[in-house]
Amino acid sequence: MSEKISRCIDVAVPVPIRGTLTYAVPEGLAGSTEPGARAVVPVGRRLVTGVIVPETPGSKVEPSRVRDIADLPDDAPLLPPDIMALASWASRYYVAPEGSMFAATIPPGVSRRSEIVVLRQPGAVPANGGSGAILARIPEEGISLRDLGASRGALRALEKAGAIRLETVLKGARVKAKFETVLHAAAAPGGAFEPAARAPRQVAVLALIRSAGARGVPSAEIEDRLGPSGTAIKALIGKKLIVPSRVEVERRPAIASTIDGEGTPIPEPTVHQRDAIAAIAAPLCARKYAAFLLMGVTGSGKTEVYLRAIERCLKEGRNALYLVPEIALTALLARNLRARLGDSLAILHSSLGPGERFDEWRRARQGKARIVLGARSAVLAPVEKLGLVIVDEEQDGSFKQEEDPRYNARDLALVRAKDASACVVLGSATPSVESYHAALNQRLTLLTLPHRIFERPLARVTMIDMRERFERTGKEELIAAPLADAVRERLAKGEQAIILLNRRGYAPVSICRSCGSTDQCKRCSVSLTYHRSEDRMLCHYCGYRRGKPTSCGTCGSDKVVLVGAGTERLEERFRESFPEARLARLDRDTARGRRAATDILEAFERGATNLLVGTQMVAKGHDFPGVTIVGVLNADAQLSVPEFRSSERTFQLLTQVAGRSGRGTSPGEVMVQAYHSDHYAMTAAVKQDYQGFFEKEIRFRRVMKYPPFVAMANLIVHAPSPEAGVRRVHQVASVVKEKAGPGMAVLGPSVAPLARLKGRYRYQVIVKAASRRKLSDALNETVDALSAGGLSSPRDLIIDVDPVSLS
């Protein structure tokens, strides 16, 4: 600690602790100490980058008792006040460490890193044995702890013996602003210094630069067009014929390219669209908070309502935030936004390169981008003068982050809009039960688009009962004959088809026909999935992989077979049956590259492919006028999952994918293969009857006391052994029950449905409360009590508020 300090500040650090830590600011340390600026601070042996927060009222810490800040990297606050307030609120509501919530608001890679370096002490001589071997590997200048690869126990022994010391070294950020050299022609003519004919490369370079005028030419562009030109450029600079300058370059994400037909006239709104646009415009112009649920059947033109609302928002001098559930949707949507509203657009999602994400984030922070488009994390983007927030496909579970901090972007959008006196529009053809219930109770204003544009009919949906077909044919069918015939007929007409099977890989189960055992992940309580492209068995939870089994690991039998089908097998079967089809597959495996999903969707959009098979990635938000047939396989699989949202997810997925068909001039058709065709979620989806589904689902929720009738949280304890897990979960349950007030119920403890994940055993406690405030207060008091009593480490306890899944 420095002997001279100016004052103390509070810092939210990205470690799993409650609250903030206090640090001293040494005199003379340059940089901002205002809330929202970053601070590099010591935590244990490490240096971490946290965010400075407003001082807690009444907190006074003696500076001599705290550690010093190591660095202040910002000259001004990085985070604006509204994002600070949102992160602070979310931290308490979701019972998340404040530091992790603040860390989620900053682009990854921009913070400075620390590294522990191992140094040999003077006079330390390598001896025989393990400690001597470790010392011998340490060079004079030291070595990073990671590169040394020695056990912590051995290092502690060497440190205690005075042979080594560990020192924390601060390194630079991985991501910085990008600069390039731009060359301009000198203002005065060169005269006698003009390059001679014997220097043709200089002549060519100078001509290129002069032709560019005031714009100048980046040196990299000269290399691309003329080949290696470094010597010529250096000579021209020496002759003062060209002048170099360093210019910052914005790294911009790629978007989908244009297609034939782009630039068509802006469509005239329908009557229902006009009503929705006017309803949103009124509070938008009055600068008042208003929350809408835009419920429109698939193909009804919700996107046009969004675009018109954004146009009005921009005219009012305010900015907009547009959230979508799938990263794959952003590229095609960005193209349409730019064509309609100009280039004042930033794109933010986790699949961008670190440099692109940093530059897009800064464009929003600096006000250069007036519209921010992105997936879940974009809800935390620094959009100033916010006037409108759009959450498309608001029902989608992808808006909920399933790792710390576990926030729901849809719900944060509502909070953020209210704080900014902005409008928020939640859009969906199949709203979540909670959102529709809120609209019926006037907490959201319901806007409806009951018809498709141009009065196009909804696609005709046909149910194929696979039980009845098996009884009649005596064989299992992956693709039922009626669906195969319909696809063949549509493709022959030059139309397109989409086939949904919401399971990736080739086969989801490997089973022994002798003893019945399945090939399980050694770290998770799930079966391994066979992926033919890799010829490996993979765990979709932890990534564990091993070779395809040739014999049973339990009984040794060689009667091991692959059971079931995923998108790989479906693709294979269609290629065999439809060799003339131009087929593509879209799932997490084929969409791994940064532009892979965009390329697949763009090829389908322009007709380069005409048959698209895939998981739920093919079901959401796409507008392909050429699609006239959609097939859904294993449509009722979700119903077998022991989740209270299973029926809702089934109905939503089927209705959404059905909406991809018949969006052009030709009528659409949908064929659904299922074994439980009489379930109310299935029958309602066939009729595309949301109201009928909602009435039955809401009765179930009311009787069973599930959301929206209660606020709920899922507390999961995970431990290295069953004994430790049982002990800890009972401690957690005991404290929760003690803190639970009237109107609250604590269920459990019990084994979690996914009993083992990534090698750790999982147990759960479910908490229900009559109000969100009661739930939040009880959970925060529980965590405080557990931390104070040392009963459970934050690393051992997951608190999932408003869970979308109870597994």
Image (spheres, rainbow, N blue to C red):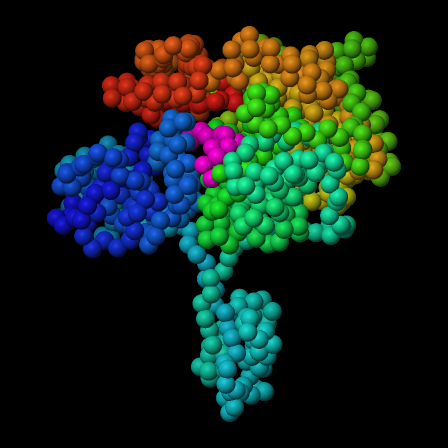
In the rendered structure, does residue 38 fall within the stretch colored magenta? no
Give me the residue at 28% from left, 48% from top. 33
Query: Which region of the structure is painted magenta?
Result: 404-420
692 above or below 585? above
Along the line of sight, which residue is nearer the eye, 420 or 519? 420
Quarter of the image for residue 733 reads: top left
Give me the residue at 73% from left, 52% from top. 263
Give me the residue at 82% from left, 10% from top. 472
Q: What x and y, as percent, mark residue 148?
A: 30, 42
Q: What x and y, as percent, mark residue 461?
A: 78, 23
478 vs 142, left or right, is right
Along the line of sight, which residue is nearer the eye, 71 or 455? 455
The majority secondary structure of the magenta stretch comes to: helix
567 vs 670, left or right, is left
511 above or below 794? above
293 above or below 161? above
* Residue 522 is at least partly visible in this image: no
Q: What x and y, as percent, mark residue 506?
A: 64, 27
Give me the residue at 54% from left, 72% from top. 216
Q: What x and y, as percent, mark residue 109?
A: 41, 46
* Residue 81 is at least partly visible in this image: yes
532 above or below 200? above
Please give the count of numbered marks on the rendered protein.
0
112 vs 487, left or right, is left
669 vs 241, left or right, is right
Identify the image quadrant of the N terminus: top left
